[in-house]
Amino acid sequence: MPRVKLDPRQSVLVLIDIQPSLTKTIFEIDRVLARIAFLTKVANLLEIPVLVTEQNPSRMGSTVSELGCLVPPQSVFPKMSFSALGSKEFCEAVEKSGRSQFVLTGLETHICVSQTAQSLLERQLEVVVCPDAVSSRSLEAHKLGMERIRDAGVVPAHTESVAYEWIGTAEHPAFRSFLTIVKGEA
């Protein structure tokens, strides 16, 4: 299993296909949305880029409002492929970021999250998936998706573990604001 020590200067947070038409049937969606919002707020605080994908948005809608309001519109990329890297614009954003670590959240674990993770690995990038911030229509599909992701070489990490690796120390200038986010999401 590869080891990944997250560095906020090398990280990008990716939110995959968190759209109303998908969220209606997702296992434990309220928990998943809360964990994604938590990590997005931390990323914004620490100035870590956030990239968002939307699967066929003309048919499936835009990112749910509680998350869409946390990211600038220029960070949202429509796609038709299940891997985010099937989108030319998303690929360009990955390249333009100049970063080597990608933390994935979103829907669905066994489809778009898995395929995106594998595509990023093929580019020799470090990939972390947050099991508490991804899900599928069933617990079984989520678990099988996480097994496949882990077997492919992706590192699973809880959203709070990611957040604390990014902040690094209680001496960080943003630590008080960070704690406010942590306490607000607990």
Image (spheres, rainbow, N blue to C red):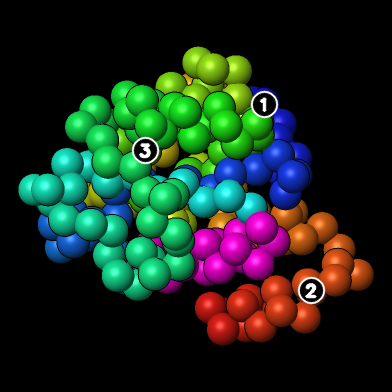
Is 33 covered by the magenta stretch?
yes
User: Which callout, 3 or 1, points at the residue further toward the start of the chain?
Assistant: 1
Q: Is residue 92 above or below residue 172?
A: above
Nearest to the observer: residue 73 or residue 59:
73
Residue type beneath disc 2: Phe
Residue at which label 1 appears: 2
Q: CA distance from mark 1 to mark 2?
A: 29 Å
Q: Quadrant of residue 46?
A: bottom right
- Check contact, mark 1 vs mark 2: CB within 8 A: no
- Residue sitting at 22 percent across and 42 percent down? 55
Task: For the C terminus, give its image quadrant.
Answer: bottom right
Q: Is residue 87 above or below residue 52?
A: above
- Residue sitting at 27 percent across and 41 percent down? 78
Compared across the picture, whether 141 is left or right of 103 comes to: left
Q: Which numbered disc covers residue 175?
A: 2
User: Which callout, 3 or 2, points at the residue further toward the start of the chain?
Assistant: 3
Q: Main secondary structure of the magenta part?
A: helix
Residue type beneath disc 3: Val
Compared across the picture, whether 35 is left or right of 107 comes to: right
Residue at which label 3 appears: 113
- Residue sitting at 44 percent across and 49 percent down? 75
Q: CA distance from mark 3 to mark 2?
A: 30 Å
| Mark 3 nearby-residue class (10 Å; few <14, some 14–19, many ≥20) | many
Q: Which residues are magenta?
A: 32-47
